[in-house]
């Protein structure tokens, strides 16, 4: 009848010529756990897998590529996409953490406009206001606008790079798709279309690189939004505060004129 053979963490298959032989590749952790449970059972009922095809199904199942093997099928283009994705992730996380700290400092500074700190963008802008108390409103507006413009590149540093990777990743995936299909057509030209194995490599690269491009692009777009939204919130606080200071300067000069 149908049976399965295990020894330790290894699953064996029956060969008519050689008898029981270990599989060249072993099953995943779920099957190994069932194997251990079966060997350690002292009674009762224990679930285990049976191969009704006398090893054919089991042999085919172990040939299923692992996640890393699938990634390797993407070739050089796949590695480039993964590398860019890792770089984008690290930069995005660092920028989000930095901007979160800056935003917290700016909000704290907004509660105390009289004592500016040079350690945050809003404080540096307030220092410009305090250093030019007698400037007319028009000049003050220009000075504060210049202060905001100086801080904007610092806030948006590397944020655009994250967006670029989000755009480039699916394009690289498309490049991998094209090169994979070229390999497939070359294999068909050389060996014909009778053997699917000759076309498998190119098709695998075409599909894997497309998937990798999307896997990198989708979360990178989200990370870019998180970073850019924080930078825009800080800029908004600075512009709102600058408008209030300019209005205050207009009021001050109006009283002097009166």
Image (cartoon, helix red, strand yellow):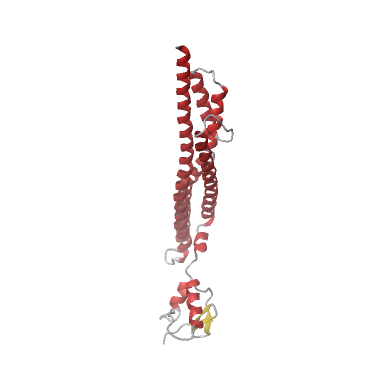
Residue 152: percent from left, percent from top: 52, 33
In the depicted structure, whether residue 233 falls above or below residue 207: above
Q: How many marks?
A: 0
The C terminus is located in which quarter?
Answer: top left
Q: With 187 as the anchor, is 116 left or right in this view?
A: right
Asked whether 97 or 178 is in front, the reply is: 97
Q: Is residue 156 above or below residue 38?
A: above
Q: Position of residue 24 (x, y in %)?
A: 54, 75
Q: What x and y, as percent, mark residue 16?
A: 49, 85
Which residue lies at the image location 48% right of the left edge and 83% below the top edge?
A: 41
257 or 1: which is nearer to us? Answer: 257
The residue sitting at the bottom extreme is 1
Which residue is situated farthest in the right direction here? 118
**Residue pictured at 50% horizontal, 34% vertical:** 110
Closer to the camera in the image, 173 or 215? 215
Q: Position of residue 218 (x, y in %)?
A: 44, 50
The extreme top residue here reads 258
Q: Identify the image quadrant of the N terminus.
A: bottom left
Report whether residue 174 is seen. Answer: no
For the question of whether residue 110 can be seen, the reply is yes
């Amino acid at each position: 009848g149908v049976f399965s053979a295990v020894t330790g963490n290894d699953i064996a298959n029956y060969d008519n010529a050689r008898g029981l032989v270990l599989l060249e590749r072993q099953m995943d952790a779920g099957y190994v756990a069932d194997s251990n449970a079966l060997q350690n059972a002292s009674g009762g009922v224990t679930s285990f897998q049976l191969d009704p095809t006398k090893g054919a199904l089991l042999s085919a199942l172990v040939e299923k590529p692992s996640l890393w093997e699938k990634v390797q099928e993407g070739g050089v283009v796949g590695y480039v996409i993964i590398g860019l994705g890792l770089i984008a992730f690290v930069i995005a996380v660092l920028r989000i953490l930095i901007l979160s700290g800056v935003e917290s400092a700016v909000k704290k500074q907004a509660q105390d406009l009289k004592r500016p700190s040079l350690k945050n963008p809003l404080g540096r802008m307030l220092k410009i206001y305090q250093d030019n108390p007698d400037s007319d409103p028009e000049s003050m507006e220009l000075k504060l606008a210049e202060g905001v413009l100086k801080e904007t590149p610092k806030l948006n540093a590397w944020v655009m790079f994250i967006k670029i990777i989000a755009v480039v990743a699916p394009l690289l995936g498309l490049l991998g798709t094209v090169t994979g299909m070229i390999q497939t057509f070359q294999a068909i030209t050389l060996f014909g279309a009778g053997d699917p194995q000759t076309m498998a490599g190119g098709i695998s690269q075409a599909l894997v690189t497309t998937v990798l491009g999307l896997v990198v692009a989708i979360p990178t777009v989200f990370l870019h939004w998180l970073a850019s939204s924080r930078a825009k919130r800080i800029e908004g606080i600075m512009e709102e505060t600058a408008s209030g200071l300019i209005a205050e300067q207009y009021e001050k000069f109006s009283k002097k004129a009166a």
